[in-house]
Image: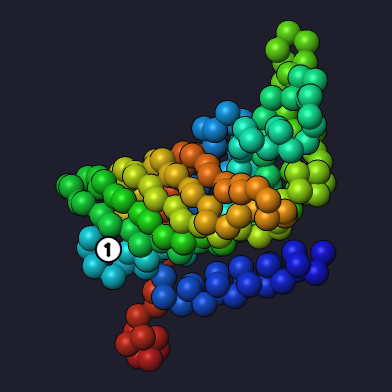
Amino acid sequence: MKGIGNCGILLFLLFFVNSALTQQIGLSGGASVDPITSLRLAAFYEHELEPWLSIQPEISYLQKGHSSLVDRLFEEPPGLRYGALDAFSSSVFAKFRLKRPNFSFYILAGPSLSRFTGAIAVFAGEDEIYQRVRLPLSSYEVKAWDWGGTIGLGLEKDIRKKQKIFVDVRYYQGFENLNQSSERVFYLEALYFDFGLIIPLTRRDKKKSQAR
């Protein structure tokens, strides 16, 4: 619990500090397209440095699936198909944008730090109906922290009041050996898509406020 609390404090500080530099706020949701379909939710700020370049700090919750997790749970898993790890992640992306009149293409890339909080096993029951079972993180014998890099490709579309909607595809590659034993190597990777909304933040005009 102490580790989760420290993670939450770090994420809050990152979120608060970057809010002072931000011009836009956004929310997104999506799913992993690994063998296990998993939920992903995120909140982010975006600070535009140039028309073609933005910095985007992000806090997200997601499930990172991996087929090799199956081998860690049981030697002969009856009906066990896939495994996944629950994670809270903090990321900072550089976002490169190619603008067009009403939409933009973009590429984003940056580092991510993740804290795993639990594990999931997916079983195939009768009639191929999948069932998810929550497990303690220790069931997979993995470390609690991971860090890695994310790269993505997406499309933004302008809508009313300078708001934007977007969709993108992202690939995450972990750089930390998550195996608790040094005898084996296990790096996490995930492929997922997002869609969401970007809302511009209005700033109060100092001259007008002083005149009042």
Q: Position of residue 132 (x, y in %)?
A: 75, 30
Q: Is residue 34 above or below residue 20?
A: above
Question: Which residue appears at 70% of the width and 32% of the height?
Answer: 70
Location of residue 54 by image quarter:
bottom left
The total of numbered circles placed on residues is 1
Q: Residue furthest left?
A: 101
Question: Which residue appears at 55% of the width and 37% of the height?
Answer: 31
Q: Position of residue 133 (x, y in %)?
A: 80, 33
Q: Position of residue 147 (x, y in %)?
A: 56, 60
75 sits to left or right of 100: right
In the image shown, does 201 or 152 lie closer to the viewer?
Answer: 152
In the image shown, does 144 or 128 lie closer to the viewer?
Answer: 144
Q: Residue furthest bottom?
A: 210
Q: Position of residue 36 (x, y in %)?
A: 61, 30
Residue 44 shows up from this direction: no
In the image shown, does 131 or 83 lie closer to the viewer?
Answer: 83
Q: Is residue 211 above or below residue 70?
A: below
Location of residue 85 by image quarter:
top right
39 sits to left or right of 158: right
158 sits to left or right of 33: left
User: How many other residues sit within 10 Å of disc 1, few (<14), some (14-19) or many (≥20)?
Assistant: some
Question: Which residue appears at 42% of the width and 60% of the height?
Answer: 110
Question: Which residue appears at 32% of the width and 87% of the height?
Answer: 207
Residue at label 1? 53
In the image shown, does 187 or 60 lie closer to the viewer?
Answer: 187
Question: In the picture, which quadrant includes the C terminus?
Answer: bottom left
Specify the amino acid type for callout 1. Leu
Q: Is residue 120 above or below residue 93?
A: above
Q: Secondary structure at mark 1?
A: strand
